[in-house]
Amino acid sequence: MDQVPSIMRSPSTVSERRWIHVASLVSWVILMSTGCGEDSPPPLSPEAILDPASCQPCHPQHYREWAGSMHAYAALDPVFLAMNARGQRDTDGALGSFCVQCHAPLAVELGLTTDGTNLDTVPDHLKGITCAFCHQVSAIEGLHNNQLRRAPDGVMRAGVQNPTPTTAHASAYSGLFDRKDLRSSALCGSCHDVVLPNGFHLERTYAEWESTVFNSDDPLQRNTCNDCHMPGRPAAIANTPEAPIRRHHDHSMPGIDIALTPFFDVEAQRQQVLRELSTLLIAELCVIPRAGGAEIEVYLENIAAGHLAPSGAAHDRRMWVELIAYAGDEVVYTSGVVSDETPLSTLEEEDLWRLGDRSFDADGRETHLFWEIERVESSALPASTPVLPGSPGFVNPHVGRRYVVVGDTPDRITMRVRVRPIGLDILEDLVASGDLAPSFIAAMPTFDLAATALTWTADSAHLTRTPLAGREALCVPVNL
């Protein structure tokens, strides 16, 4: 059997050894020794079923994928830990379980933490978003802040019609896990939408998806969260001789965030994120050369996300356009040019096209501390909506920005969209407050969105009428 390193596992603490019952240890050891071959696995105890390692013998590929995911990393993420620690301190503990209820839901449910400040004492298998937490959800009671009802009944639920019986646990089909069922997006949205204690809807990924063309009963249009973030392939989903070929859903679940510490399969995780981002947006670069300069129009369109781009913690993301114009070998214009080690906030330029949310407190001061946020101004790129052009409520997903070059007329222009999961300025602030180690600043990557990397020259461009100004310009097309 392919063994996966215990990437979440630190040496057992005294509290962990006290917590795990002898019965669960015995059943886990027997299961690991017998596997899921010709021998029937023993029934998992209620305690053992909470440990993702108990799932590994019968579902080794699912376990491997999950083990390198941000769901497994959710309660280990140093930025989460730093932000939670600061929030508890700044609010005198009023923040309570607000963060940890999504980042370590089983630990909260079992009373092992109330505010996430003692996660180092919680058994590792109860940190993060685990197999049992998701696959024992029996009802969705709300669409934000983890309003999911878990049934600790030993039944593992999935979108599998007529599941093959196993002696390890009971199994059941649930439409909540079926990508063909729109409720499967609500299952994800319950944690991926965040409403602040003051009632402000800060993270809106599910709400954004609801207004897109993908939230549709039409199977030709429908794309649920699983369709994009858990792609499938024909395969057996259990390591048993009698397991039929079904649809294996990838449990890596890449998005934009990545692990910043040594973590199982961390390089694979990074490549998955980069692959997801590579076709997120398409771009077009149009130029109207003038004597003494040029007018430049950049167009972006969100074609691959079923939500805004960026989404989630969009107030923490940094996504922007880099534009460089050359006359011969001389740079005659730049916008959005920063090194990978430099915060975007150091750029003080009117032309900067930054995509995402800017957040403000009650006094109108810009803040990234979510417990202070009262409103946001969004410049995120919209997703495709079912509303037809010209109809009320239509939002054009083809968004443009105009730049003016004064001086030498450029003969070559390059552009690309860049993104950081969390802004370096936010990390620097957490370092300054004493909540984050400085080494994590250098660990935060800057990704380039491959489909937006364009180079304009007059010879490579074609003449077209631009939608922004309605004028003829020389444009280089989408890079796909």
Image: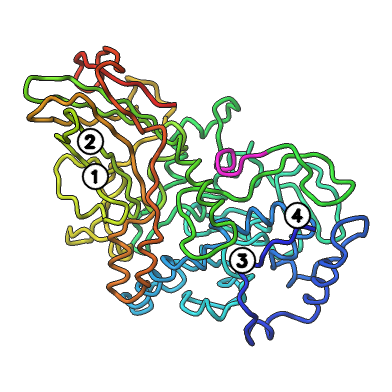
Q: Earlier in the sequence, mark 4 or mark 2?
A: 4
* Residue at screen point 48% across, 74% down: 116
Q: Which residue occupies the extreme front position in the image? A: 329
Looking at the picture, how far across and down is residue 340, in whole percent? 32, 52
Relative side of 198 to 74, left or right:
left
> Dividing the image into 4 quarters, which one contains the N terminus?
bottom right
Quadrant position of residue 399: top left
Report which residue position mark 3 lands on: 7
Comparing 347 with 183, the one in front is: 347
Res 393 seen here: no
| Residue type (three-letter) at the residue carrying disc 4 | His
Residue 229 sits inside the magenta stretch: yes
Looking at the picture, how far across and down is residue 307, in whole percent? 43, 40
Looking at the picture, how far across and down is residue 70, in whole percent? 53, 57
Instruction: Categorize mark 3 by other alpha carbons within 10 Å: few (<14), some (14-19), many (20+).
Output: some
- Is the residue under label 4 in contact with that under label 1 (CB below 8 Å)? no
Q: Earlier in the sequence, mark 3 or mark 1?
A: 3
Q: Which mark is residue 59?
A: 4
> Dividing the image into 4 quarters, which one contains the C terminus?
top left
- Is the residue under label 2 in contact with that under label 1 (CB below 8 Å)? yes
Give above or below for 459 relative to 364: above
| Residue type (three-letter) at the residue carrying disc 3 | Ile
Comparing 58 with 180, the one in front is: 58
Report which residue position mark 2 lands on: 324
Which secondary structure dominates the residues rendered in magenta? helix
Q: Which residues are magenta?
A: 225-232
Q: Earlier in the sequence, mark 2 or mark 3?
A: 3
Q: Earlier in the sequence, mark 1 or mark 4?
A: 4
What is the C-alpha distance between the residues marked 3 and 4? 17 Å
